[in-house]
Image (spheres, rainbow, N blue to C red):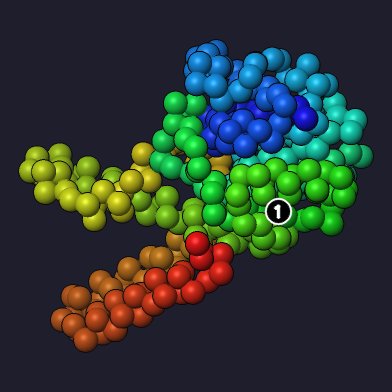
Amino acid sequence: MTITIVGLGLIGGSIGLELKTKRFADRIIGVDLNPVHRDIALERGLVDEVQKLVFAIQQSDIIILAIPVDAIRILLPFVLDQVTHQAVTDVGSTKYCITEQVKNHPKRGCYVASHPMAGTEFSGPEAAIPGLFSKKVGIICDMARSNQKALEAITNLYMALNMRLIFMNSKEHDLHTAYVSHISHLTSFALALTVLDKEKNDRNILNLASGGFDSTVRLAASSAEMWVPVFDQNRDHVIEVIDTYIAKMNLFKSYISEGENEKVGELIHAANQIQTTLTSNSWNKQ
């Protein structure tokens, strides 16, 4: 089996690394517009070779688009134009906007809309790591729109990455990811900006930062190139979750300003339940 990975950053590079380790494919071809990324991917053994996209597609059984979602939306129709028997998937953090772009494509059945729920705050092929996907959730959307051969190929790929698969439609995906992924990045960006603004006038503030701050603000190092298109494509749900988050913050603000300590405590106790919910949820069991 030959697999082409388009985009040799954190996700694409980590997929290549893991599939090579598992010997899932006989050959992995990398495609990337950035020559530095191509060189690093080859040097690190993330792929076996690099080629231009059209030639790579012709030689492949599976094509994985691991590029920002705005680029996926542009490139996916072109890739489907080229395929004959191949399975095509993407790993984008939005799904509805992308799937709508190819809903009437004559080769829509060759495409499986997917999203591995894994990552770090780092980017580029140097950030690729083994085991990134193990025991994480892999989402496959609108499976009825994909043909059986393509669906089996992508399902087997995610199983080789040791992911737990769930299935939903693309609209559900975008709603849920706004609440469990996109808002996490937004709040991290906002917290980082808040502290950086304060740090301009108080140089000692970052000297006090500890593990709690580090873990909360970690995602603020994430790539704007990746996240701006995600927020744009999932705009309605992102605005909804921002409004909900602001309402909760205003509730905290109101109770704290009024000295309503008991009510502040009630909010915190209610929030504590998230850990129980996460650990009892079958998706998160190890």
Left or right, 209 with reference to 110: left
Q: Observer-nearest residue: 184 or 252?
A: 184
Q: Observer-nearest residue: 60 or 273?
A: 60
Residue at image coords 68%, 25%:
28
Percent position (x, y) of residue 35? Answer: 55, 13
Task: Classify mark 1: residues with Cα within 10 Å, few (<14), some (14-19) or many (20+).
Answer: many
Q: Observer-nearest residue: 225 or 61?
A: 61
Q: Observer-nearest residue: 269 or 259?
A: 269
Given the image, on which type of amino acid does mark 1 rest? Ile
Residue at image coords 41%, 51%:
186
| Quadrant assignment for the N terminus | top right
Percent position (x, y) of residue 191? Answer: 29, 51
Q: Secondary structure at mark 1?
A: strand
Left or right, 112 with reference to 205: right
Percent position (x, y) of residue 128? Answer: 48, 32
Residue 82 visible in the snapshot: yes
Give the tally of numbered discs: 1
Residue at image coords 88%, 48%:
147
Residue 225 visible in the snapshot: no
Left or right, 62 with reference to 15: right
Left or right, 3 with reference to 32: right
Residue tagged by mark 1?
A: 140
Judge whether 28 appears above or below 267 on screen.
above
Residue at image coords 28%, 45%:
193
Judge whether 68 appears above or below 211 on screen.
above
Percent position (x, y) of residue 141? Answer: 72, 55
